[in-house]
Image: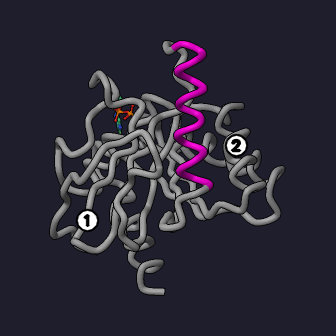
């Protein structure tokens, strides 16, 4: 898929205030610092579309970007912040779960995991919760350029093994690097194939 236009539409902290259209939505989520903003900017060929996690005030918001006047890319708040209060963490969880569970336009959720790390408990629990709730999702391994090919393969194999313990069938997965655009075509083609089906 060619990206012809990508524009910021709205930020909010309530699923009730998301755009009232029926365009399909593809949402992106992951632990803070996983590389979500970089991935969104890489996919849309725009260095500044998604703000990095260092930007104050952006962390608790659902951000909608309209792509090609056709579909929304949705930047969900990151989970697993150690630095915010318990109250804020609960609010964050409420925002995330209400979007994921209630937003009918959400066509697929991309769960980002850092390809440098072993399977993390917080990610595995989140993925299990998605399964229990019948949410369509895919895994996106980020920062692939940061490991040597053999190490990258070993890390990804370890993740897939852990996923196989939870699931009979593996979800679709993508190996990406925002640094050198690995996985961009595959991910965009996947979105296009769902949009067309
Ligand atoms: P977010 O908190 O998930 O939005 O993460 P960011 O996109 O802000 O990225 C966190 C840090 O990881 C930043 O310093 C990025 O430059 C770096 N980063 C993100 N993606 C990549 C990648 O694909 N390769 C490399 N080498 N660094 C990355």
Direction bottom: furthest residue: 197
Q: Which label is found at residue 139?
A: none
As drawn, is 168 to the left or to the right of 81? right
Mark 1, residue position: 67
- Which residue shows up at 45% across the image and 55% down it? 27
As drawn, is 36 to the left or to the right of 56? right
Position of 15 relative to 22 (above/below): above
Q: Which label is found at residue 158?
A: 2
**Residue 23, position in %: x, y?**
37, 72
Assign ligand 1 to one image quadrant: top left
**Residue 86, position in %: x, y?**
60, 15
User: What is the magenta range?
Assistant: 85-101
Label 2 crowd bin: few (<14), some (14–19), many (20+), radius 10 Å:
some
Q: Nearer the viewer, residue 59 or 52?
A: 59
Magenta highlight: main SS: helix
Label 1 crowd bin: few (<14), some (14–19), many (20+), radius 10 Å:
some
- Quadrant into which the N terminus falls: bottom left
- Which residue shows up at 44% across the image and 80% down it? 193
**Residue 46, position in %: x, y?**
17, 50
Between the C-alphas of marks 2 and 1, the distance is 34 Å
Q: Is residue 22 magenta?
A: no
Position of 136 relative to 195 (above/below): above
Sequence-first tag of 2 and 1: 1
């Amino acid at each position: 898929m060619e990206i012809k236009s990508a524009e910021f539409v709205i930020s909010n902290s309530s699923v009730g205030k998301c755009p009232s259209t029926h365009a399909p939505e593809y949402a992106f989520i992951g632990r803070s610092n996983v590389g979500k903003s970089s991935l969104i900017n890489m996919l849309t060929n725009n260095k500044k579309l998604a703000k990095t996690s260092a930007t104050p005030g952006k962390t608790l918001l659902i951000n909608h970007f309209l792509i090609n006047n056709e579909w929304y890319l949705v930047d969900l708040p990151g989970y697993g912040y150690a630095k915010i209060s318990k109250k804020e963490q609960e609010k964050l969880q409420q925002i995330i779960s209400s979007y994921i569970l209630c937003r009918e336009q959400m066509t697929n959720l991309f769960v980002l995991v850092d390809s440098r790390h072993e399977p993390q408990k917080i990610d595995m629990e989140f993925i299990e919760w998605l399964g229990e709730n019948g949410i369509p999702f895919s895994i996106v391994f980020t920062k692939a350029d940061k490991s040597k090919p053999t190490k990258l393969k070993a890390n990804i194999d370890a993740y897939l093994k852990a996923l196989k313990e939870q699931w009979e069938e593996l979800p679709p997965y993508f190996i990406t690097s925002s640094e050198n655009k690995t996985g961009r075509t595959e991910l965009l083609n996947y979105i296009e194939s769902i949009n067309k089906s």
